Amino acid sequence: MITDPFFYAVVIPALLIVGLSKGGFGGAMAIMGVPLMTLAVPPFQAAAIMLPILILMDMFSLWTWRHHSDRKTLLFLLPGAFFGIAIGWLTAAWVPEGMIRLLVGFVALVFSLQYFWRRFHEYRSRMPTPPRQHNRLYGIFCGLLSGFTSFISHAGGPPYQLYALPLRLEPKIYTGTSVRFFTVINALKVIPYFLLGEFDATNLKTALVLAPIAPIAIFIGAFVVRRMKPSVFYPLMYAMVLLTSFKLIYDGLLA
């Protein structure tokens, strides 16, 4: 088990952010977990420690949001995500993580800036933009990108949000759908991570020590979102994506 105090000083706040995000904000800021942990441990070790805790968080989130989901969103995204995880597994040894972060960061930046630009024009014209309709091919593409980036560094949130946020689902439905999507994604990653040798005794014992943080953060996040109006929820979500894009671009350039 890891005993370095600096590791826990970094990781505990990171897990609280991830749990709050997964518990109520559709995983918008869950992407921050591994980058923060890499301040103390190598990226793949950080991802390996995080994965069992993410799965535990998923179990609590599933129970919390068990009555809320959008079936069509899941049907369009999950097939691509499966192949994205497979590609991540096959290319894990030579894919530069910095390049992946940079790519996802730029996509998330354009996506979030587009939203705020559209909202500015809506405000000026007094004509709201209608929600986007489902698109199977676009869903498969976003699912594939989400599965791939999730496998590399648990950074599958922005590609998922590229598809799901413009649908403008009711906040509870959006959150419940994202919980189900990432529950499946994280479960699918277990076998590849095991085969890559990332689940050693040190990482698993460390994850066990950190596990009690999961339910606390999940229930706080759910408490907040259940009381939040869509007019507040969606601007906040896009603002989180914007902040995340800055972090990803910074990490990618640094790498």
Image: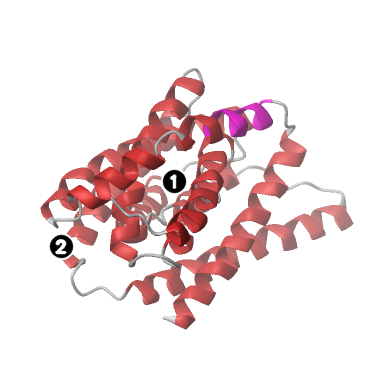
| Amino acid beneath label 1 | Asn
Secondary structure mostly seen in magenta is helix
| Residue at image coords 66%, 32% | 225
Which residue is rendered at x = 72% and y = 48% of the image? 235
Q: Which mark is residue 90?
A: 2
Name the residue type under label 2: Leu
Q: Nearer the viewer, residue 143 or 63?
A: 63
Q: Is residue 63 inside the magenta stretch? A: no
Residue positioned 54% across, 44% down in the render = 16
Q: Quadrant of the C terminus?
A: bottom left
Query: Residue at image x 18%, y 70%?
Result: 93
Write down the region rendered in magenta. 218-226
Q: Residues within 10 Å of mark 2 (few under 14, many from 20)?
A: few
Inspect the magenta stretch and tell me whether residue 225 lies in it.
yes
**Circles 1, 2 touching at the beta carbon (< 8 Å):** no
Q: Quadrant of residue 103?
A: bottom left
Relative to 231, residue 153 above or below = below
Residue 53 circle label: none
Mark 1 Cα within 10 Å, few/some/many (few <14, many 20+)?
Answer: few
| Nearest to viewer (mark 1 / mark 2) | 2
Question: Does residue 23 appear left or right of residue 114 in this picture?
Answer: left
**Position in image of residue 136 (x %, y %):** 38, 45
Residue 30 spot, x, y in % from top left: 49, 49
Q: Which of disc 2 and disc 1 is earlier in sequence? A: 2
Asked whether residue 185 appears in the rendered view, the answer is no
Q: Position of residue 199 (x, y in %)?
A: 19, 50
The residue that mark 1 highlights is 135
